[in-house]
Image (cartoon, coloured by chain):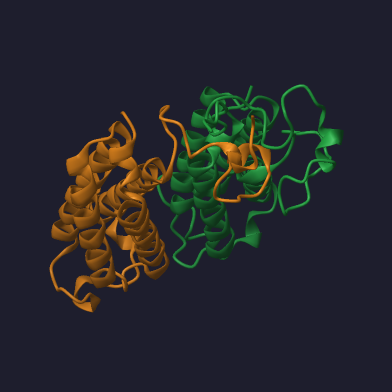
Chain colours: A green, B orange
Amino acid sequence: MSETTSPSAATGTPVAAPPPSPRSESLLTPMTSLPESRRATSSVWQGWAFFGAVMMALLGFFQGLLGLVALFDHSYFAVRTNNLLVLTNFTAWGWVHLIAGVVAVAAGVGVVVSGRPWSRYTAIVVAGLSAIVNLGFLSASPVWSTIVIVLDVLVIYALTVHGWELDRS
Amino acid sequence: MAETSQQPRGAQHTDYEDRSGPPATGWAGWVVFGGVMLIVVGLFQVIQGLVALFDDGFYLVRPNGLVVDVNYNTWGWTHMAIGVVAALTGLGLLAGNIVARVLGVIIAVLSALVNLAFISAYPIWSTIVIALDVIVIYAIIVHGRELKSEQY
């Protein structure tokens, strides 16, 4: 017969049960071959988009740590060319990284707290800027900056390709 | 009545996979990822160009150590040109421009080639840009049809 239900893009209610029944009754109906999850549909911390947000916070911590090291212990860095880009001393670079790291953590937490589009777009822009800042600092700490750039790409992927998962309710 | 064939493809029952895909709101999907990555590639290359123009002592070899033996000014302008075109193409992809798809692939290939030739000047930068170019090409070619299916 005609199926009046059009599940895919319409509402947030998932497959299983006929409308009035709560999820617990879905086990009684021989609907699918896959076991139905009895867990309430929690949107908290699931999926690629939240992975991207958590990764954003992580890379913010990495970058903040990089900034702190640059500020307080810059002999740690192996500056092979002895010649940093744009900013001439480690103190300036340290502050740049520290601020960028704090902004990145804030952006990541913002996406976790509210999955709104504007917070995702902000996080994408912040990730891009963080990648550029780390490109400039690559001469001083190649491995660390490369890791942060890789995380940036991962965050941008997660938030652009999977960001729509947060558009719920 | 509501039948079992509500999900004919027999997909998993996670909540968010009920949707048929990313909705046609802004900044969703692989093409957006490709566009953002292309902008990042463009900006990286602009940085390479600016360093070549203004601070070429930063690079590890002198021009005679490069594959194409031209001075760093020429290299700098080349990088700047490719970088600016790449960034603009990335913006075009974000705006949903169809031409930007083809142009994006072309400019990513060009950027990868130029960076390969430039690799001895600063290997890690060039490697990162080449890797990002590959990612851009993947995003545009494999997932580019999303651009046509959405109403941008």
Q: How many marks?
A: 0
- Which residue does the image show at 36% across and 44% down from the upper left? B31
Where B7 falls versus A140 (above or below)?
A: above
Q: Is residue B49 above or below residue A114?
A: below
Q: Is residue B112 visible?
A: yes
Q: Position of residue A130 (x, y in %)?
A: 51, 43
Q: Is residue A149 left or right of B77 when viewed as pictured?
A: right
Indicate left or right for A18 with A128 as reference.
Answer: right
Q: Position of residue A45 (x, y in %)?
A: 73, 39
Question: In what quadrant of the picture does the C terminus of chain A appear?
Answer: top right
Q: Is residue B15 above or below residue B137?
A: above
Q: Residue sitting at 17 percent across and 48 percent down?
A: B81
Looking at the image, residue A134 sits to the left or right of residue B96; the answer is right
Q: Quadrant of residue B76?
A: bottom left
**Residue A88 can be seen in this image:** no
What residue sits 57% from the left and 28% below the top?
Answer: A5
Q: Residue at x 64, y 34 (%)?
A: A102
Q: Quadrant of the N terminus of chain A?
A: top right
Q: Position of residue B86 (x, y in %)?
A: 24, 47
Asked whether A106 or A40 is in front, the reply is: A40
Q: B62 or B138, which is in the foreground? A: B138
